[in-house]
Amino acid sequence: GDIGTKKDCLQISWPLRILMDAGVPFPMLLEAYQTLFEIQQKESAGAGSPATYVYYVSNICCVLVQWVTSVRSDRKKGENGTSSSSVVQLERTSSRILLQIDTYKSSLESLVGVMNDENVSNIYSTFSELEDSIKRLS
C-alpha cells in the first residue's frame, strides 16, 4: 500500500493546515503535536477518553504523512543531488520516529476492542505504511 492513497481517510485539521501553509518545519510540527498529546495523557492520567487519544494520534499521523509526502515530492524534484531540509530532517530523526510509530501502533491495538471505529484501523494501517516509507526513504 501507498500512503498517498490512505491520506484521504485522515482529515487534516485546520490548525495543522495553516501551520503547514505558513511553512512551519515538519520536525517542529511533530514535536508540538507530540507535546500536546503527552500533556493530554498526563492530565488524564492515562484515563482519558479513547476518542481524545485517537484525535491526538491522528494529528501526529497526519503530520508524518504530510512530511513523507513532502520528502517524496522533494526527492522527485531534486534530481540534481541537493537534499531539501525536509529530506535531511527525516533522515536525521527517522530512527526516533520509527520507535514512536511503534508505540502509537501498540496503543491503537489496545483500542481496537474498545472502539469499533474504522478510523482506528485506518490510522493503524497508515502508521504501518509510514514505517515502510520512512525505512525506504532514510
Image: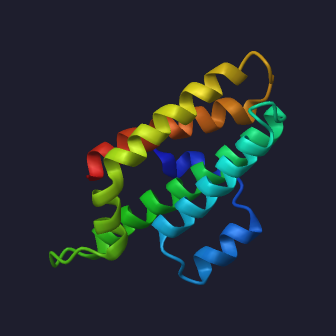
Q: Residue at x 71, y 23 (%)?
A: 111
Residue that extends furthest to the left in the rendered view of this protein: 81
| 138 relative to 113, above or below | below
Position of residue 20 measured from the top left corner of the image (x, y, whole percent)? 59, 74
Please name whichever residue, 1 or 66, is drawn nearer the observer in this view of the structure: 66
User: Quadrant location of residue 109?
Assistant: top right
Q: Residue at x 59, y 53 (%)?
A: 34
Residue 20 shown left or right of residue 17 in the figure: left
Q: Residue at x 75, y 47 (%)?
A: 40
**Colouring convention used in this rendered image of the protein:** rainbow
User: Quadrant location of residue 1?
Assistant: top left
Position of residue 58 measured from the top left corner of the image (x, y, whole percent)? 67, 47
Report whether residue 73 is seen.
yes
Please name whichever residue, 61 or 80, is drawn nearer the observer in this view of the structure: 61
Q: Residue at x 51, y 54 (%)?
A: 64
Residue 113 shown left or right of residue 68 in the figure: right
Position of residue 117 measured from the top left corner of the image (x, y, whole percent)? 79, 29
